[in-house]
Image (cartoon, rainbow, N blue to C red):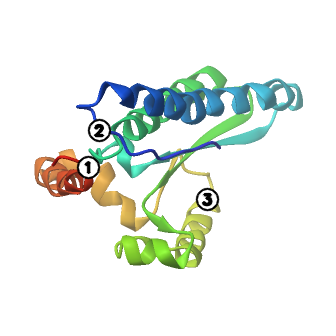
Amino acid sequence: MAGVMLVEDLRDPGHITAARTTLDVNVLGTIRTIDAFTPHLLARGRGTIITVSSGIAFLPFPLMPTYGASKAAVHAYTEALRAHLAGTGVEVTELVLPAVATEPRQKEMNPAALDLTAYLDEAWQLLSGDPTPHEVLVQAVHQHRWAEREGTYAELVARRSHALQILPGR
């Protein structure tokens, strides 16, 4: 699936360019990809569509506000798609990503990011379950997905808000 993560300063009206790009790639790109394959899968009467969202869909990262909104939209779209395709033989699974270090320098920037190999091993194990889960949640993303339920939401958003200090004029 598609994804871009762009930093935005919501005090600058020029952020709309980044917001537009983020929504076009992350939301409309996901929908376009699904639309390209759905007729084929329905004709076969089986298959699995896997969407990719993020823990940021459930616990925003204020430095990338439209990214979080776009991944929340992917989550909602996935839920609706699952309902639309119920009984067709086409399954719908949402892969909810935490921060994953796909390059060594990303681990330096975010020490909490999971090593790519560790993430893939855990995600693959969850995807291999029978039946395939509706949401694939590796352990590292649980704090995001369940923050509101666990009562940690406000504290975690406040902690994540410290990243706003990198913006000019802060």
Horizontal and vertical percent for residue 91?
67, 38
Q: Position of residue 81 (x, y in %)?
A: 59, 26
The x, y position of residue 169, in whole percent, is: 18, 46
Identity, as a three-letter code, of the amino acid under mark 2? Asp
Type of amino acid at the residue the image marks with label 1: Leu
Q: Earlier in the sequence, mark 3 or mark 1?
A: 3
**Do tag 3 and tag 2 residues touch (Cβ < 8 Å)?**
no
Would you name the residue on which mark 3 appears?
A: 127
Give the labeled residue for mark 2: 9
Locate the N terminus by quadrant. Answer: top right
Q: Mark 1 packing: few (<14 Cα in 10 Å), some, or many (20+)?
A: few
Rounded to the nearest angstrom, the CA distance separating label 3 from label 2 is 36 Å
Mark nearest the camera among 3 and 2 is 2
Provide the secondary structure element on which disc 3 rests: helix
| Residue for point 64% across, 32% down | 29
| SS of the residue under disc 1 | loop
Q: Indicate whether 31 appears above or below 113.
A: above
Type of amino acid at the residue the image marks with label 3? Leu
Residue at mark 1: 167
Q: Nearer the viewer, mark 3 or mark 1?
A: 1
Q: Which of disc 2 and disc 3 is earlier in sequence?
A: 2
* Quarter holding residue 65: top left
* CB-based contact (under 8 Å), mark 1 and mark 2: yes
